[in-house]
Structures are given as structure tokens and as C-alpha cells.
Amino acid sequence: MAADLLWDDVRELFDPDLMGSLPDACVPDTSMADWQALLDLVVARGWRFEYSEGERVLPLPTAAAILARKPDSECPALRVWPSPDMLMIFRFGAAKEIDFDLSLREIQDQERLDEFCGFLREVGRHLGKPVLMASEMGKPAEHPVLGFLPETDRVVVIDPPPGMVNL
């Protein structure tokens, strides 16, 4: 299978100095069922994961239980390692959007880019929704720079930042 993106064409999008070291990613327009589908995918794929509320590591509950927590409770997080050295951190803010962070320092060559694109593709295909990434200061649903788009079934550059060429 051909790579969705070529490292030499998109390396600026993975430059921590330009994009921030922890950009945001999201799946917009989701529901509780989409969150549960994500949890089911993580388990079914056998990705290493850790669920926590504050500093407490806990067994993975259902999406309904996580999203029904009291507003003043500790913020839940799901850390997922789709590959041994690549971490995605999902934040359970609201059912309407699946938010997660990633470290650009973990994606610095074609092999890692392919792993990242594979992760976005798996999540997007499983949910039948786009999976978008923005700079650390941007909002993925409003100003994405790249993402998996169901209509193309690929990860593509969406809106390159000013100064980027050859995209």
C-alpha cells in the first residue's frame, strides 16, 4: 500500500517549533456511541492503553460511565500506544467531539508518519468520520492542517500553513 503522505512533503507539519510539540487532533460531530466504538476499537486492536482519572489508574469503564461523571470530578484520560513509541492521549470532555493529543517528537520520519496515518485511518474508518489534526494553538475541527477524510479514504493535507510549499 502506498503511503498516504510523504515525509519530505509534510515534515513542516511535524516540526515541534512550528506546530507546537503537542498538537490537537479530533473526531468532530461524535456521540456517546462513537466514544464507545473508539474504546471497543482500542481493545479489539490490542493496543496498549491506560485509563486514568487524575493520578488514579483504573480499569477501562464504558463511555457512558466516563461521560456521565460529575463536572467537578478528576479529568479522565485514555493513553493509547498504537505502536510501542507513539502515544495518543484522549480527553473525555464531551460526547460531541473526540479530542486527543499527540507528540510530534514521536513522528519524525517516514516510518513513524506511516504508523500515525495508519492510526488515523483505523479510527476514521471504524467511526466513519474524519479525524483531523491542527497546530497546538489551533482547533482541529475549525483549522485542520491534515487528517483522514472518509470521502478519500486517505490521510491528506487539508489546509497547509502559510509558507508551506509543494503540497
Image (tube, rainbow, N blue to C red):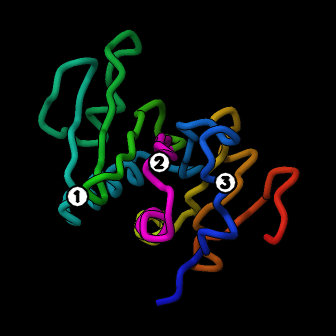
Q: Residue at x 35, y 52 (%)?
A: 86
Q: Amino acid at mark 2?
A: Ser
Q: Amino acid at mark 3?
A: Leu
Q: Residue at x 65, y 38 (%)?
A: 17
| Number of the label disc, if any, that sits on residue 47 | 1
Q: Are marks 1 and 3 in contact (CB under 8 Å)?
A: no
Instruction: Estimate the x, y position of residue 105 in percent, counting from the top left.
Output: 48, 45
User: Could you give the CA–CA distance between mark 2 and mark 3, rounded to whole angstroms?
Assistant: 29 Å
Q: Which residue is mark 3?
A: 13
Q: Amino acid at mark 1?
A: Trp
Q: Viewer-nearest of labels 1 and 2?
A: 1
Q: Which residue is nearer to you in this view: 94 or 124?
A: 124
Question: Mark 1 or 3 closer to N-term?
Answer: 3
Q: Which residue is mark 2?
A: 31
Instruction: Estimate the x, y position of residue 118 in percent, counting from the top left.
Output: 43, 70
When asked about the image quadrant of residue 127, the answer is bottom left
Question: Mark 2 or 3 closer to N-term?
Answer: 3
**Residue 105 colored magenta?**
yes
Dot 3: element:
helix
When asked about the image quadrant of residue 76, the answer is top left
Which range of residues does the magenta coloring cover?
98-116
> Where 69 sits versus 106, above or below?
above
**Residue 2 colored magenta?**
no
Q: Which residue is nearer to you in this view: 140 or 161?
A: 161
Q: Residue at x 50, y 57 (%)?
A: 108
Q: Residues within 10 Å of mark 2 (few under 14, many from 20)?
A: some
Dot 1: element:
loop
Residue, far bottom: 1
User: Could you give the CA–CA distance between mark 1 and mark 2, rounded to whole angstroms?
Assistant: 22 Å
